[in-house]
Image: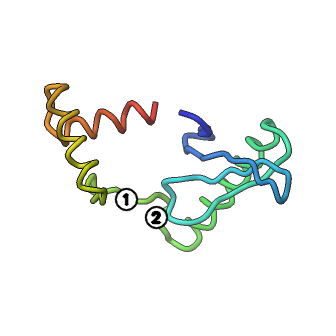
């Protein structure tokens, strides 16, 4: 998966911030913000570890669940033509629309 790193078991999306001319990481799947910045990949990982540790410590102090809960359900809004195209692609693959979408998401997130 592009622009994603794992730090201490948590996934973070990495981007370049042109205004600061630094790399920026943002943990996803957490209940709150835990972003971090650095000028090199090595330093970014170290800053990520520090940011994550502070975040978990604050959650523990405040009695907050640190990770988001996902229900396994979400709604997708798309153009009717795209919906129809997805149904055709799923049928061509011998899958239900749900199976096809799950497979597509899994493939994209590898």
Is residue 66 shown above or below 103? below
| Residue farthest along the bottom direction in this orientation | 62
Please give the label number shown on residue 65.
2
Say how the picture is coloured.
rainbow
Per the image, label 1 sits on a secondary structure element best described as loop
Up/down of 40 relative to 52, above or below: above
- In the figure, residue 71 lies in which quadrant? bottom left
Which disc, if any, is residue 48?
none
Q: Residue at x 68, y 50 (%)?
A: 25
Give percent across and percent down for residue 59: 56, 66
Q: Residue at x 28, y 48 (%)?
A: 82
Q: Are marks 2 and 1 in contact (CB under 8 Å)?
A: yes
Looking at the picture, how far across and down is residue 60, in whole percent? Answer: 56, 65
Q: Is 28 displayed left or right of 92 in the figure?
A: right
Mark 2 Cα shell of 10 Å, populated few (<14), some (14-19), many (≥20): few
For the residues marked 2 and 1, what is the alpha-carbon distance in whole angstroms?
Answer: 9 Å
Q: For the view shown, which residue lies furthest in the front direction?
A: 81
Residue 64 location, x and y as percent? 49, 69
Which residue extends farthest top? 93
Q: Is residue 106 left or right of residue 45?
A: left
> Which of the two discs, 2 and 1, sits closer to the camera?
1
Q: Which residue is at a point 29% across and 56% down the rendered structure image?
A: 79
Give the residue number, with chain letter if any, for mark 1: 69
């Amino acid at each position: 998966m592009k622009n994603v790193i794992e730090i201490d078991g948590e996934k973070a999306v990495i981007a370049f911030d042109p205004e600061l001319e630094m790399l920026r990481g943002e943990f996803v799947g957490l209940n709150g913000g835990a972003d971090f910045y650095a000028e090199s990949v090595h330093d970014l990982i170290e800053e990520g570890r520090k940011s994550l540790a502070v975040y978990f410590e604050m959650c523990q102090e405040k009695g907050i669940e640190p990770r988001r809960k996902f229900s396994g359900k979400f709604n997708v809004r798309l153009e009717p033509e795209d919906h129809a195209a997805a149904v055709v692609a799923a049928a061509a693959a011998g899958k239900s629309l749900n199976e096809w979408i799950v497979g597509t998401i899994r493939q994209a997130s590898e």
